[in-house]
Each structure stands twice: as structure tokens, then as C-alpha cells.
Image (spheres, rainbow, N blue to C red):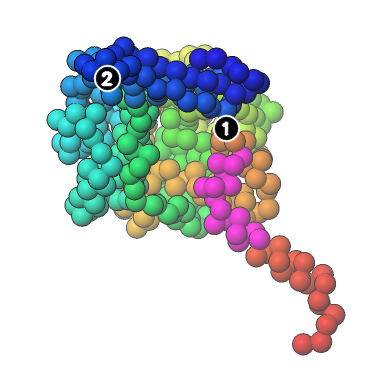
Amino acid sequence: MKERSPGVWWLRAYAGRSSTGKPVQGSRTVRGGKRSAQAELTKLVAEVAERSGQMTPLTRGMTVTELLERWLEHLTPLREPGTIRGYRQHSKAITAAFGSVQVSKLNAQQLDRAYRTWLGQGRAARTVRQRHAIMSSALHQAQRWGLIARAVTDLASPPAIQARPGPATDPAVVRQLISAAEDVNPVLAAAIALAAVTGARRGELCGLRWSDVEATGLLQIRRAVKHDLDPRQLVVGATKTHSERRVSLDDLAMSLLAAHRGRAEHAAKMTGVALGPGAYVLSLDPSGAEPMRPDSLGDAFARLARQQGAKLRFHDLRHFAATQLIGAGVDVRTVAGRLGHADASTTLRVYAHALQERDRAAAEVLGGLLFKELPR
């Protein structure tokens, strides 16, 4: 690889001579930075090696199943356990479709056929798109490793998906759910209220400790409770975006937390224990030493919602918080900060429907200012 002029690179790969004595080689000129030129050289080396028949036995005979296994082994230390579990689940369907196919012989037509089959089996377009994304990630990693010249997923046609907004939730429904939970499960009632006023993720709520609640009305979201690769095991780690944030609470929310704290202290006293300095806000353990499991929280909410005739998931409380804030005119950057989005563009994309409502309201304001005096 030689830089002939700034940003212009000459690449050459040589793989010896063919049986007729002709050199097996390839060259090309590319433009860009050094990193992109190195990536192009990797592709060129793989192309020339494949043409010469000098690919390693591992590369030549590697199946899709074997590639996915190597890809998952590579990613496991780099991704959250829940993410890896999801990858493994989708990988089962992928290997069932063409796991025995050699990676070097996989083509876009096979991928498109699998996509159509999955859709015909009733799988959602979003699910099919996720499987395509997994195959794409694995094949592009193989390309970076120099095992293949090109990821055939670049040529495939996965189904398009349309963003679906969360259900519009009436504040009265949320109040009804909190009230119903107070009679049977005060911890669940507190979780619903906190989710609705903070928009925090389920694992983040389970990771809240009493030391994270400041008397000034601020809530520190520092960690999240997650399921390990073995879903029966819990781990407490960083939030989804690996960042901490502070969320303001109003007086009513602080009063609710104070009442919940009083119930927790009473329960601890009745069982002869005390809430430790690291006690969790949402805990079924009288001492607060063990956080509530995120899956248990979701299941308890689902049962309550069914009993109350509400078609909601616990995650919909996060949508409720976001849409209510946007509807009230709170700027998107502030909403993104409360939700813990790493970038406000995520908020803009996910809650575009709520922003459209605000746009209509803006049109009414401007129209009223300009044309209210005109005869009708």
C-alpha cells in the first residue's frame, strides 16, 4: 500500500503464479484516509487469494453456523449479556435456514428467499430485519478479518419496517394502575409511578438505591440491573448508554418516594432487619439488599394491566413520559436527557409522531397571530 499523493493510495496484492505461470495479482487506486485504504487492501487480498485458490481450509469450508459462532465469541465480551442472548436466539433461526451453507457460497438470493419464508411464517418485518442485521454484522466482521471479499448482505433486500409509536396512554389510566397496585403490591405501585415521571428504563429503575435519592429533588440514575447470559442470574452494571444522569422530581414525586421509604422501613423493622446504606428502592427483600428482577417487574405489571383492562407493557410508561413531555412543549434535548438517550436524534426519530402534534399546534399559533384579524 503506497500513498502516491495526499489521500490517493495505490494497492497491490500478489498471490504467486498460476499453473500456467501467470502471476495472480490485483491492484487498484483508492481515495480516502489511511484506515479506509487499509480496509480496501484487506478486500483486495481476499479477492486475490480466492482467485488463486490459496484461501485457508477454514475460510474455504467455513459454514454460516461456524461463522456465527466465531462472531458471537468475538462479541460476547463487548456487548451486554441481554444483547448476546438476543443474538443467540435469532442465530438459531438463521442456522436453521442455511447454517450448513458455506460462507463463500452464500448469495443474496438465498438470503432474500429466507426473508420471504420468515415473513410467510408470520414473523414481523422487524424480526426479519433483526436477523438480516445479525447476518450483516457477522459477514462484515468476516470481511474485516480478511476471510471474505464482500458481505453478500449488502446485495440482499430485507423488508422495510415502519416505526410504530407506543400506545397513547391517558394519565388517568396510569393513575388507575398506580392506585390498583397500591392495594396488592406497593413496590409495583412505586415502580409504575417512577417510570411514569422519569421515563427511566426498567433495569435502571430496578438499580435505584435510596442513596440515589437526593433531598433537593434530584434522582441519580447511575446503574442498571440486567439479566446475565444465564437469565436466572442478575448483574448490576452500567446503564444502556454507559452514562449517568440526574433527573429532577417534583414535590409530589418526592412525597411518593418518602411514603414508599416509610413502608420499606416499617417492613424491615417488622422482620427484624434494617435498610442498609445500599438498599434498593425497588426490592421485595425486607433489607433492600436484593433488587427487584426486571422480568418480574414486567410480568407483575402485565398481570395488573390485564386485570385493569389496559393493553400496556411496562416499557409503554417510558413512551408515556416522553409523549406527555413533548406534548407539553418541553424541548427535545431536555426530554432526551431525562430518557437517557445518548443523542437527541434518537428522541426525534422515536417520537416523531408526538413532534408532529406539536407542529400542528405551532401552525395554529402562527396562523392565529397572522390571520386572526382577516375576515372569514
193 displayed left or right of 75: right
Residue 311 drawn in magenta: no
Q: Secondary structure at mark 2?
A: helix
Give the CA separation, mark 1 to mark 2.
46 Å
281 displayed left or right of 104: right
Q: Quadrant of the C terminus?
A: bottom right
Quadrant for residue 225, please give it. Answer: top left
Identify the residue shown where x is 34% and y is 24%. Answer: 47
Residue 355 drawn in magenta: yes
Count of all numbered marks drawn on residues in the image: 2
User: Magenta stretch?
Assistant: 344-359
Q: Along the line of sight, which residue is nearer the eye, 84 or 191?
A: 84
Q: Residue furthest right?
A: 373
Q: Name the mark nearer the viewer: 1 or 2.
A: 2
Q: Along the line of sight, which residue is nearer the eye, 113 or 82?
A: 113
Q: Main secondary structure of the magenta part?
A: helix
Question: Three-letter amino acid code at disc 2?
Answer: Ser
Question: Three-letter amino acid code at disc 1?
Answer: Ala
The disc at residue 52 is 2
The disc at residue 342 is 1
Is tag 1's residue or tag 2's residue first in the polypeptide sequence? 2
Identify the residue shown where x is 34% and y is 47%. Answer: 158
Residue 89 horizontal/vertical position (percent): 25, 33
